[in-house]
């Protein structure tokens, strides 16, 4: 497995939460291959910066508009530095 940067991990977490209706924290944790303490740290960071939102009633996390902007820019950056 290759080393993942913080930007890579943020993109994986936001992608997992971007699915229709959001996703519970455990599903995001499994999709991103992070431990529970790591996903708690990342989710808190993303909530504080407005990239992720938490729905208390449904107990799911959803990617915000700002989070979708991050994902779009991340994809563009990936394409720019792609080595063939």
Image (tube, rainbow, N blue to C red):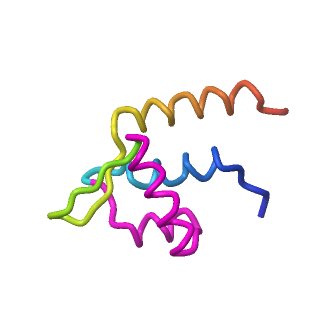
Q: Which residues are magenta?
A: 22-50
- x then y, percent, for residue 51: 41, 42
Above/below status of 65 relative to 55: above
Residue drawn at 32 percent across, 57 percent down: 61
- x then y, percent, for residue 49: 43, 41
Quarter assignment of residue 16? bottom left
**Magenta-span inclusion, residue 33:** yes
Residue drawn at 72 percent across, 54 percent down: 4
Number of labelled discs?
0
Extreme residue in the left direction: 57
**Residue 57 placement, left or right of 67:** left
Residue drawn at 69 percent across, 28 percent down: 79
In front of the other: 54 or 82: 54
**Residue 37 placement, left or right of 58:** right
Residue drawn at 35 percent across, 51 percent down: 19
**Residue 6 placement, left or right of 46:** right
**Magenta-span inclusion, residue 25:** yes
The image quadrant where one finds the C terminus is: top right
- x then y, percent, for residue 11: 55, 46
Above/below status of 42 relative to 26: above
The image quadrant where one finds the N terminus is: bottom right
Above/below status of 10 relative to 74: below
Please, what is the dominant secondary structure of the magenta stretch? helix
């Amino acid at each position: 497995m290759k080393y993942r940067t913080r930007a890579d991990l943020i993109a994986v977490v936001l992608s997992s939460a971007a699915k229709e209706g959001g996703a519970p924290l455990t599903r995001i944790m499994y999709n991103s291959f992070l431990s529970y303490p790591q996903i708690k740290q990342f989710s808190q960071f993303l909530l504080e910066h407005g990239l992720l939102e938490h729905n208390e009633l449904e107990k799911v996390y959803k990617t915000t508009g700002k989070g979708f902007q991050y994902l779009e820019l991340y994809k563009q950056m990936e394409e720019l530095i792609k080595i063939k």
